[in-house]
Amino acid sequence: MGYPPHTRKDLFKIISSFLLGPDPKKRFIKFVVLVAIGGVTGYLSFRRGFHLTPETFKHFVLSLGVFGSILYTAIFIIRPIFLIPSIALFIAGGLAFGPIWGPVYASVGAALGGTVGFWIARLMGHEYVMSRLKFGAGEIDSYRFSFSVVFLLSLLPIMPVTVINYGAGLSHMQFKNYLAAHFLGLTPRAFAFGFLGNTLLEPGSRRFYIGLLILLLIGFGSAYGRMRLRKKRRNFICL
């Protein structure tokens, strides 16, 4: 038995007005508090509360049938709020659903979760960061968060995904450019970690080392691309 439609709308308006008030400074403070509370909750719940092993996670997700893939994708959507490690989710997807469908679910979920993270930062923190924080305005801008930068950062295996989500949202970057770059960069990363996750129960095997090699190649490739991009921009500024 749910709330009546008008009650749900009123509740949504109350929450929206509380989180998205007219004062940019208060919105930014609420953004910081939301991230802090979400991070602590996520740490206590997902890292300390549940003692899941690769085997138990696989059996739990598969026991849910079609709902297992839905639950897995939904975790990605709430991941930016609770700061759930994306690497763990990528590996878990490959372990539970295989090296193909696991990364497919992960890529879709990561795009949805990235959208959530981007708009939380854009609506709650962008205006204050750009207008008041000199460091933030200088470091978090459309120049540093361009299509190529977001793509390379999303591709880099060790780069925290939440940093990209929130950083792009706080910058001047257009959402459509961010989403395209983020999705294109995360998809190869998801497949690499998914392949590795699929071999997690057979460490030392040939497939396991192939998965590690793929991750290393992606990591070196994205790092090299980022280095070349920085060098190109420095040369452009000198001109």
Image: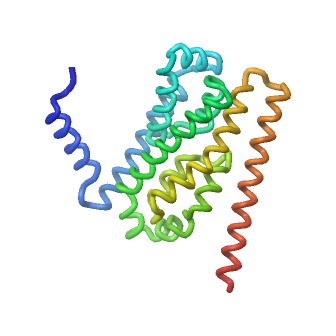
Total labels: the figure holds 0
Choose between 87 and 74: the one closer to the eye.
Answer: 74
Q: What x and y, as percent, mark residue 85? A: 57, 38
Residue at 51% from the left image edge and 28% from the top image edge: 72
Residue at 62% from the left image edge and 62% from the top image edge: 148
Q: What x and y, as percent, mark residue 188? A: 67, 44
Which corner quadrant of the image does residue 169 belong to?
bottom left
Q: What x and y, as percent, mark residue 97? A: 61, 24
Which corner quadrant of the image does residue 232 belong to?
bottom right
Tell me: residue 38, above or below residue 146.
above
User: Residue at the bottom extreme?
Assistant: 239
Choose between 33 and 80: the one closer to the eye.
Answer: 80
139 lies left or right of 172: right
21 lies left or right of 173: left
Residue at 65% from the left image edge and 56% from the top image edge: 152
11 lies left or right of 114: left
Tell me: residue 17, above or below residue 3.
below
Name the quadrant of the C terminus. bottom right
Image color mode: rainbow
Tell me: residue 219, above or below residue 6.
below
Residue at 47% from the left image edge and 27% from the top image edge: 70
Name the quadrant of the N terminus. top left
Q: What x and y, as percent, mark residue 28? A: 36, 56
117 lies left or right of 9: right
